[in-house]
Each structure stands twice: as structure tokens, then as C-alpha cells.
Amino acid sequence: MSFIIIWINMRRYLLFFACIITIGELYAQQITVSGGGRPAYNHTPEISTGLTGGVFVIYSLNNATIEFSGEDDSPISWRLFRENGAASSTPISGAIQNGNISTLNISEADCGYIIEQNGESYYLWIIDYSQSPLILNAVSTSNEEGQCDMTTLMLDGEGKKLNYYSINGAPKSLRRELTVSYMSLTWDKESLAYTQTFQTETVYDFSSSIQVPSPLCNTDFTVTGDQILNYWGLSQTASTEEYITSAIGATATAEQTYREEATNEDDRHPTDYLGGSAPAEIEFKAYVTDAVTHIEWEFSDKEDFSNTIARYNDETLWYTFRDEGVTYVRLVASNSTATCQAYSETFTINIGEPRLEAPNVFSPGTSPGVNDEWKVAYKSIVSFKCWIFNKWGVQMFYFDSPDQGWDGKYRGKYVDPGVYYYVIEAKGANNKKMKLKGHINILRPKN
């Protein structure tokens, strides 16, 4: 048994040792680009390019070198290729080899190099930044109207593409990555307000005009870059004068007032939608950004607002929904020239079908809190009147709100048990009148 354990442990050790040897062989070769006045910027391209040695950007050719640390001290040779690919490479002389290290002075850039040793080839591309520098003289904003979603920045300067090629001659380019920074407004749900926030956008390549999302407040734009200059600590920066925004944002809230005390009302407090039983009172509030000069609440019976049934201009709007059916509400905001518009979310208010039912029996004064008050069950009743009479036609009670009820008393005393009569006149959210008549049986022992 101990022999088997020893053999297994030895086998694990040998596998681990083999992995170390394999990894060591993989990373034994190393390519270092230096000189040029600044540390070389190293970019790892896509595997499909075949540039296993990477892409290097040097500040200039001044004293720039490539150093290759080989597997051993066997001969190391060098070749150069251009945009046609590695198949059209030509030999290079002048590299100095000392043991397993070979060093080549870079006399040409914006080209590829092939390093060969022991039948293995390593490919890299060198870009001379001094031949395609980024120059930012100034930046300004376009004067075009209607920059509601995107704002155009005009860049005075230059910055040609930093091109390189795969070993098969496929063109590629290294992104410059310019950064545009500015202030804007962002909606904060917690504070229910638009707050000023710092924004950045990345522009991959230099262009005489670039677009960024329009800010929601007045601001200036600052352009910095590129990523190569950032690496060297030589970033260029240019800023605009203050930009007066025309872009706008609009947010709205809707909060319904519920009749918590109306326990005999169905659907008085819906939890997953607005509306329910009419009348439904809802407070709408508008929150807008700096450039908004006009607001309007649109009410429609169509979800696409193809038919507007009402318009209001209040910043805070209290509205009571009385009609059965679905109403759609949204806030529309615009700037002073009406070139930019913004819409809030659409609120859907669903008022349910009217219902009115009257019980025919209750027992006041017997078990407090249990069937001791006569109340109707209702939904979406917008007007209501109820009379209660005894058998001789004497009015015992009158009330005009369906959430109220009769406690079985007349002039402060409980009435005798027996049969009483009610007459109800009401109107539902469907605008139809409702009339109910019936009897009420009072069950209670006589005093």
C-alpha cells in the first residue's frame, strides 16, 4: 500500500515538474523595445494578426532598439516586412548577438520585424509616434440648432491613424482613445431631483468633428489624449468656451391618494397599478432640466397618444379620474425654440367598472364591531345618496357618501328590530345612473 502511495506522489511531482518546464520554455523568449526618448508603449493585438511579439509605439527612432532574449545561444536572425505581410519579408543585418541575447538598432519604423531562432519565428510591429503625432490646437462646439441628443465638437489639430498590419497584410489600427469630459445632469430617484454629475466619453480616433451625448446643463468640454501620450505623461488638452445647452430632460412622478378608511370599497388601494375604484385622485409632479421653458401634461385614451383628450400646464397637477376605462398620461417638455422635446414615462390609469350592492340584514347594538353597521359594498361610485325609512315612511337616516353607513339609530337611540327600507340614487364611473331599493332586516333583542 505504501508503495502505491509513493508512486502516486512521485507521478504528481513529475507532472508538476513537467508543467514548470513547459511554462519556462513558453516564457523563455522575451522581446524588449527601448530607447526613442520615452518608454515604448506595448499593445497586445488580436491573436488573429499573428503578431506574437506585440505592437510597440516608440516616441522616436532616436537610439531605439529591439532586444530579443532567446532560448539559448544558437544563431538569431532578423527580417523586416511591411503592409504586404510577412511573406514578403527581407533579411536585416546589423543585429549584435551576445549569448542568447540579440539587439537590433531600429533604423526603420511603421513596419514589422521577424525574429527567428531554432526554427521558431516571432513577429512584432513598430510604430513611430513622431510620424503620426496627436496635435490638439483647439476645440469648439458646433452652432447648429437642434442638438437635442448629440452635440458636435469641432477639433482643430491632427492625428492620423496609428496603422499596423498583420503577418498576412490585413490592415489594423491602434485606437488613440481621446477623452471628452464635461458636466451634465442625472436624475436622482432618492432625492427626486436632477443633480450635476461629471461625464466622460471615449472617442477612439481623431476626427475634425466628433459627437458626444448632449449635456443637460451649460458646461464646457475638455478633450484630452491620447492614450499613448497619457502613458508618457504628455497628454494634450483643449477646452471649449461655455456651451449653452438646448438639450432637455423631463421626469414625472404620479402618486395616488387612497381612501384607507373606506373599508367597504373594492379596489380602493391597488398595489401594482394606478386607478382602481373611482374617484381616483392622483398628484402628478414635473421635474425638468435647465433648458426647459414649457411643460404640458398630455391625457389620451390611446397608448400612442394619437388622440389627446386633455392638456394641462401645471408643474404640480392634481387630477381626479371619474370615468371608467383606461387613461394614459405623460409629461412633455420643450426648450425655448421648441427644437428639443423630452417625454416622461407614460402613466396608465385604469378605472374599474362600477358596482353597488346593499345588504339586507344587520344587528346593531348586539356585538360591537360585528355586523353592527349597515353599509353598501361598492366600486367606482362617483355620486351617492341614500335614504332609510321605517314602514310608515318616516326617514330614519340619510347619508351622501358610499363609505358611510347607518348605525341603526334614530335620534340617538337604537331603533326597534324589524324591517326598514332604503332608497339609493347613485352614478357610476361609466356615467350611468343607478337606483336601488330594498329592505333591511334589523336583528336585535328589544330593550
Image (spheres, rainbow, N blue to C red):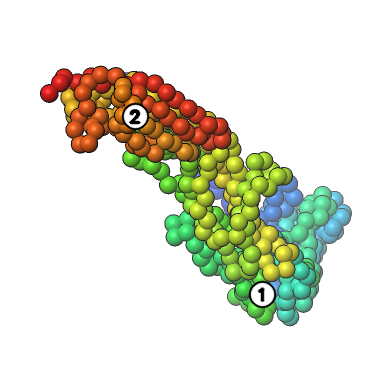
Q: Is residue 153 above or below residue 47?
A: below
Comparing labels 2 and 1, the label whose residue is closer to the camera: 2
> Quadrant of residue 225 in the image?
bottom right
Q: Is residue 319 visible?
A: yes
Residue at 23 percent across and 23 percent down: it is 363
In what quadrant of the picture does the C terminus appear? top left
Residue named by callout 2: 388
Q: Nearer the viewer, residue 276 or 167?
A: 276
Residue at 82 percent across and 52 percent down: it is 170
Locate residue 232 relative to residue 20 in the image: left or right: right
Q: How packed is label 2: few (under 14 Cα within 10 Å), some, or many (20 or more)?
A: many
Q: Amino acid at mark 2?
A: Ile
Q: Nearer the viewer, residue 142 or 174?
A: 142
Locate residue 277 relative to residue 236 in the image: left or right: left
Position in image of residue 119 (x %, y %): 73, 47
Q: How packed is label 1: few (under 14 Cα within 10 Å), some, or many (20 or more)?
A: some
